[in-house]
Image (cartoon, rainbow, N blue to C red):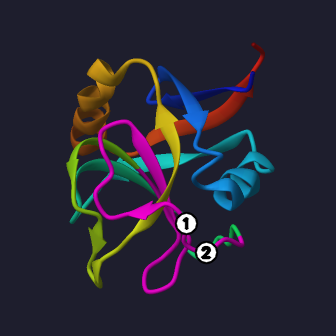
Amino acid sequence: MERLRVTIAGLEFDARFEREKAPATCAAFATRLPFMGKAVHVRWSGEAVWMPLGDYAFGVGYENHTSYPAPGQVILYPGGISETEILIAYGGVHFASRMGQLAGNHFITLTSGLDRLPEIGRLTLWEGAQDVRFELVAA
């Protein structure tokens, strides 16, 4: 079985791809693993961190998209009216940008350590950008 690990600000979380609900997004992202970047606290969306990716193209459209990801859900906004981004919810979220409401593809769900998610919000809000790494790990 495929195991995914997401490390944010040094905190590790087990995770799973949502391959049945977002097959194209999962496939496009999996080819880029390990995927690393920086996360900062969101500006308009509520309790989440985001990885701004500019014009980075994953080559996917909308699938399994939502504007209201639950804590532990990871969404990919493939670009369009705002820049490409990955958002990780740690609390209540209404996904938006200065252009208005957005929807992103829910393609990863964190499966462990959900009680530690608010710490990610605190770190990014008060200490700035934090390292994020998505990787496959041996089962």
Magenta stretch containing residue 66, yes or no?
Answer: yes
From the viewer's perspective, is the residue at label 2 or at label 1 nearer? 1
Q: Residue at x 53, y 28 (%)?
A: 7
- The location of residue 98, given as percent across then percent down, is 26, 80
As drawn, the label of residue 61 is: 2
Q: Tell me the amino acid under the disc marked 2.
A: Gly
The foreground one among 103 and 119 is: 103
Q: Residue at x 35, y 74 (%)?
A: 102
Q: Residue at x 31, y 29 (%)?
A: 117
Q: Residue at the front extreme?
A: 20
Magenta stretch containing residue 131, yes or no?
Answer: no
Tell whether label 1 touches label 2 (CB within 8 Å): yes
Quadrant occupied by the N terminus: top right
Which stretch did the figure color magenta?
A: 59-87
Tag 1 secondary structure: loop
Task: Give the vertical position of 52 relative to 125 (above or below).
Answer: below
The residue carrying mark 1 is: 63
Mark 1: give few (<14), some (14-19) or many (20+) Cα within 10 Å: some
Task: Give the vertical position of 16 relative to 87 (above or below).
Answer: above
- The location of residue 50, given as percent across then percent down, is 40, 54
Mark 2: give few (<14), some (14-19) or many (20+) Cα within 10 Å: some
Tag 2 secondary structure: loop
Q: Tell me the amino acid under the disc marked 1.
A: Glu
Task: Give the vertical position of 81 relative to 57 (above or below).
Answer: below
- The location of residue 93, given as percent across then percent down, is 23, 54
When asked about the image quadrant of residue 4, the answer is top right
